[in-house]
Structure formats: C-alpha cells, structure tokens
Amino acid sequence: MPARRSRHDHFPRVDPARRTAIRAAVSELDAAWTAADTAPDGLLTAIDAQADASPDAAITALLPWLTDTEWLTARLTSALALLRTDPFARPPLRPVGGADGALGGLVLADRATIRLTLRLWPFATHTPAPAPAIFVPGRAALHILASGGAQLCHHRVVVTPAEEAGAFTARAAAPCHSDPPRPLHTGETLHLDTARQSVSLIPGQHDTLVLELTVQPSSPLPIRSYDPATGALLHVSASRRDSSFRAMALTLLRHLGRPDAAPLFVAETQSEDFAARWHAMRELIALAPTAAHAPLAAMAATDPHPEVRAAAKATLALLSPLPLAGGGVTRHVTRDTGGPVTSNAAEHAPPKPSPKGEGLKDAPCPAP
C-alpha cells in the first residue's frame, strides 16, 4: 500500500511541472479576484470612489463590506480550494504579522489611505503582559466576526484642534484614560476616531476574528503610545506612511554601517514630520557623529518644533569638545540620545517607525 502523501513534504524544487501548475493556478485566482474587485460593484471600485471623501464619509460608505461578508466567505473558500489542490500554493493574499511571529491576519484591500484587513487574535493559554495603547490619526470600523470569548478594553485621550493641526508637544499631551474590560460580542461593530480612541483585547478561550476597516490620511499629528496603567505618554512616531518607510530604511542603513549614505539622513532631517526629523538625526549621530554635527547645530537653532530644538541642543552639548587637563580636548558621543518624546527621562524611548498603527491591538489592558 503506497504511503500517503504528506502536506509537509519538501517544496518541489526538482518538479518544474508541479511548480508551473502552482504558478498558473495562483495567477488564475489572482486574475479572478482582480476582475471581481475592479468591477462596477467591486471592492476596489467602492474604495476608489471614496478617494476624496472625508474619513467619516469613507467609513460610512464602505461599511456594507464589513457587515455583509458573503464576498469574504467566497474569497476564503476559493483560497482554501487552491490549497487543497496543492499545499505549496500561496493564495494571492498579503499576510500581516502578529505576536511572536505568528500570522496576524490578511490584507484584503489597500488603496491610498484606506485598508481593509482580516485580523486574527489566537486564544491565549496565559494572560499576556499589558502593551501600550496606540493612537493613530484617522478613523476605523471594526466588525467582530467571532469574539472567541475575548474581552475589550477601550482607551481614550484628548487631542486639541491645535495639536491635530501640528502643534503637538509631549510636554502638553493629555494623559490616556482606560475603561474597565467588557465582553466582546460577535456581530458588533465598533466605530473609532483613532486619533482619540483605541481598543485592545484580552484573548479568550477561542480565536478572535475581526474585519477591520481603517482610513488614515496624512496628518501632522504623530502616532502616540501610552502606558494604559498610568496614562503616561511613552513615545511618538511619524504617522505618515512614507515617513515611516524612510525611517525604517535609515535604521537599516545605520545597522549596515553605511556612512556614505549620510546625505540621505541629512535630507530626512528636513522632513515635514517632527518625529521623522528627530529619528533621522538620532540615526545619523549613531552612524557618523562628525557628519551629524553641522545638521544637528542647525536643528538646535532653527527647527520649528520646540522639543526637537531642545533635544538637539542637549545632544549638541554632548557632542561638543570639552577641555582636558593639559590643554587637550575630548569628545563625548552617545549612540542613543533619546528624543523629544516626554519630559520624563524614563520615557525617552526613540520614535519608532510605524507599522501602520491599526487601532485594535492584540494586548490586554490592566483590570481597574
């Protein structure tokens, strides 16, 4: 009796016919989904029609794609059929990373400022440690497909119109307030002003599945991270996606030790986003302190954001030569100068590149 084929056998590197069949099947499915999405009644057509709409109007117009999920069921059914045909086939869906490197979900549509994602929170055998509450400029609607017995924590923070227009400072930022956990219900839809509202989950006994629609236009207001236990601001980061991508690229260049790329860092210190400017300067100081001195001095003198100027001045003092006994000089250089994030030294975490900053986080908030 022949042995049953294992779906865990090695990828068919020496079977070109099978690999050709896999590519053909994936391409055929991708073409079918693209045709459906770009049809007059398709998902991408509906999203593109909201290109000039306000975030609230876009959420309202696209809400039927969350509450009527027959299209999603059909899509997942065809993806599973592809996997049954060959377990090494990869359905044309973009994965989203979750905790500990696990799959966190699938991106179903991503156009300009609008993204639709199927999010998965696996059940927990133990209570995870609390994680920061994240606030991202924009709007979100979260439709709960399966609660899994999870609990929901709601976090709130006050943002003034002036802060939203670009006058945000860590020193004047309002604290975060968290509500007590309450049961998450299958079928409910949450509407969030994600600049001021955030939610987190305490996982239940079963997996939690959420269909998440986010609209995140460019904003001078940064992404903010708070400690839900104390309400204190932890750090800020650039909310613009292009700024985040450049920040990650600069961090990579710094890790690779590429001082020849210093002009790219200097250019980003002129970014419109104050968090992006300071991130670029921090990375440049760590990469090439000598090349950083002149742009750091300029930042200390002329940067439009008061906390960036203050951090640059403090860092410039650390980089300045100090006299030694006998007439020599020494130079003190720090690889991590902190940043204009909070007035508390314990909270001087560097601005981090944004992964996109979805409103629903996979971490619990503490019980009141």
Image: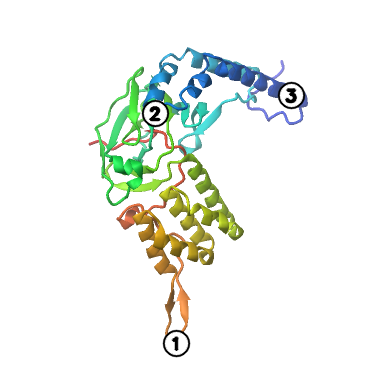
- Residue 262 point in image, percent of width and height: 56, 58
Say what amino acid the circle numbered 1 marks: Gly
Q: Nearer the viewer, mark 1 or mark 2?
A: 2
Question: Secondary structure beneath disc 1?
Answer: loop
Question: Secondary structure beneath disc 3?
Answer: helix
Please name whichever residue, 56 or 133, is drawn nearer the observer in this view of the structure: 56
Say what amino acid the circle numbered 2 marks: Pro
Q: Are marks 2 and 3 in contact (CB under 8 Å)?
A: no
For image coordinates 50% across by 37% down, the residue present is 101
Please name whichever residue, 362 or 254, is drawn nearer the observer in this view of the structure: 254
**Figure quadrant of residue 32:** top right
Q: Are marks 1 and 3 in contact (CB under 8 Å)?
A: no
Q: Is residue 86 above or below residue 331?
A: above
Instruction: Tell me how the rendering is colored.
Output: rainbow
Which residue, given by chain and number where applicable, does mark 3 sit on? 20
Question: Secondary structure beneath disc 2?
Answer: helix
For image coordinates 49% across by 65% down, the residue present is 294
Q: Nearer the viewer, mark 1 or mark 3?
A: 1
Q: Is residue 131 above or below residue 210?
A: below
Which residue, given by chain and number where applicable, does mark 2 sit on? 55
Task: Report how far apart the C-alphas of labels 2 and 3 lie in the structure.
Answer: 43 Å
Please name whichever residue, 12 or 69, is drawn nearer the observer in this view of the structure: 69
**Figure quadrant of residue 150:** top left
The disc label shown at residue 350, or none: none
Q: Is residue 141 visible?
A: yes
Say what amino acid the circle numbered 3 marks: Thr
In terms of sequence position, does the residue under pointer 1 or pointer 3 come before the other? 3
Task: Report how far apart the C-alphas of labels 1 and 2 lie in the structure.
Answer: 65 Å
For image coordinates 31% across by 47% down, the residue present is 233
Residues packed near mark 3 inside 10 Å, few (<14), some (14 to 19) or many (20 plus): few
